[in-house]
Amino acid sequence: MFEADLFSDQIFDEWQTIGRDLDERGFAVLPGLIAPQACQALAGLYEQPVFRSQVHMARHGFGRGEYKYFAYPLPDKVADLRARLYSQLVPIANRWQERMGLEVRFPAAHEDFLARCHAAGQTRPTPLLLQYGADDYNCLHQDLYGEHVFPLQVAILLSRPEEDFTGGEFVLTEQRPRMQSVPSVVPLQQGDAVIFAVSQRPVSGTRGSYRVTMRHGVSRVRSGRRHALGIIFHDAA
Ligand SMILES: O=C(O)CCC(=O)C(=O)O
Ligand SMILES: [Fe+2]
């Protein structure tokens, strides 16, 4: 299903660039991670019985639209993507932990990190499929589900901008100490992945690194229907 083989030599350079973008801005785009047909297939799962729960965002003040958390066992494609992206991101996550003065380090294999989450009672899977229609949006938020937090997450756009939907842009804000927040809009095509900080990231200052707080959301969809796949690496309590 993957356009990009996450471990091939060709994309080694791409991961170097991704690491640099993440360090500099707290987010990076991995273009064409999922082929159009596979995007359609993943969006089609929304109506299938592969979920543990459904959230209507308006009921919780999270925005407007809905999402569903996958149940274990995850669909093969989602499980594969989660494990493979994790192993690419772990060196970056550990570098960030060190720069933020945090003691926790993450193991090389995702299953070992999940064992840590599960032992602490964070046993529920967090990968999710989101569905937005006209006028739906997702408020700025952070996907924190307990004490154990992997500092990076991934969202993949499954629909085609301008064809399947208009509006509905992926948005990030960065809140700096004693300064006003910086907004970023991340342009995505179908199948593109955005990798971004879950809640905090290190920024280099004149006297070493300091932490900034990131939030993400989706601007109002103006027309059509938008699906996205969210890959969060920690499980939920
Ligand atoms: O719909 C999106 O693009 C982002 C959804 C989201 O909040 C997430 O994947 O955590
Ligand atoms: Fe989110």
Image: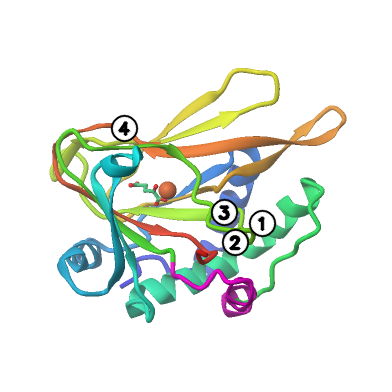
Q: CA distance from mark 1 to mark 3?
A: 9 Å
- Residue depth check, mark 3 versus mark 2: number of the one nearer the observer: 3
Give the image quarter of residue 1.
Answer: bottom left
Residue 137 % position (x, y): 28, 36
Amino acid at circle 1: Ile
Q: How many other residues sit within 10 Å of disc 3, few (<14), some (14-19) or many (≥20)?
A: many
Main SS class of the magenta portion in the image: helix
Q: Nearer the viewer, mark 1 or mark 3?
A: 3
Q: Amino acid at mark 4?
A: Ser
Residue of label 2: 89
Number of residues whose C-alpha sits closer than 10 Å to that of mark 1, classed few (under 14), some (14–19) or many (20 or more):
some
Q: Disc 3 designates what residue?
A: 152
SS at badge 1: helix
> How many marks can you see?
4
Residue assigned mark 4: 219
Q: Earlier in the sequence, mark 3 or mark 4?
A: 3
Mark 1 touches mark 2? (CB < 8 Å): yes
Q: Is the residue marked 4 within 8 Å of ligand 1, measured from its CB?
A: no
Name the residue tied to disc 1: 92
Mark nearer the N terminus (2 vs 4): 2
Distance Cα–Cα, label 2 vs label 4: 27 Å
Identity of the residue drawn at 36% across and 77% down: 74
Q: Residue at x 50, y 72 (%)?
A: 84
Residue 125 place in picture, x, y as percent? 44, 69
